[in-house]
Image (spheres, helix red, strand yellow):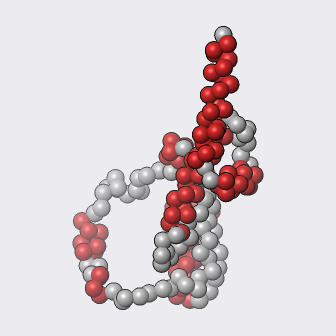
Amino acid sequence: MQLQLAYIVLVPLAAGVLVKDHVPGDHIAAFHSFIDQHGRHYKKGTHEYFKRLTLFSERLQKAEAINSRPGHLWIAGVSPLSDLTPEELSQKKGWAGFASRTGGQVSKSLRSQMSLLQSESDLPDECNKWANLTMLQAKDQGGCGSCWAVTSATVLEAHREIYLGKQEQLSAQQLVD
């Protein structure tokens, strides 16, 4: 009985010490800000807390590695998904198919059109139409599963700003309805 009690008390304590030794202090502080910002309720010292802290720290470490690359063109960071397990993430990805009569297969006509695309040598050395765009912030679609509508509206907004120089927020909800 005493051995079981010691196991119940010491194993989580040892796991916490091991995780704390491998997670940088600034990651722990960032995790606490993250759980406050996103309304998470992990009790400090529990297995769940250390599991989520480790996942968050791994993703923050990847973001820091990306951001440290010379000449990077975008900034990586954490998202509301940064503390989720791979299984939880896969549940959030939604439908992976295509709405087509061919069941997602690329048609012959589309394949022939794709072959007409310019080769890489025909492209200019530099093109940065994104430099002055104001709508570069990522949009949160929530859990609705209509990422296609959010993406479509965002692309249309970007093209309107690039080609017409006008900013206008379009409704993804209207596309769904």
Please state, as top left, top right, bottom left or bottom right, where the C terminus lies in the image: bottom right
Residue 24 at what x, y percent from top left? Answer: 62, 53
Q: Is residue 153 above or below residue 161?
A: above
On screen, residue 141 versus residue 65, left or right, reads right
Residue 170 at what x, y percent from top left? Answer: 62, 73
Q: Give residue 168's quadrant in the image.
A: bottom right
Residue at 54 percent of width and 52 percent of height:
58
On screen, residue 116 versus residue 9, left or right, reads left
Closest to the observer, 130 or 116 = 130
Residue 141 at what x, y percent from top left? Answer: 61, 59
Q: Is residue 176 above or below residue 123?
A: above
Closest to the observer, 140 or 116 = 140
Q: In this figure, what is the number of numbered marks?
A: 0
Decide if residue 38 is in sight here. Answer: no
Please state, as top left, top right, bottom left or bottom right, where the N terminus lies in the image: top right
Decide if residue 24 is in sight here. Answer: yes
Q: Give residue 117's quadrant in the image.
A: bottom left
Residue at 48 percent of width and 78 percent of height:
71
Residue at 62 percent of width and 65 percent of height:
139
Residue 14 at what x, y percent from top left? Answer: 62, 33
Residue at 72 percent of width and 39 percent of height:
44
Q: Is residue 61 above or below residue 13?
A: below
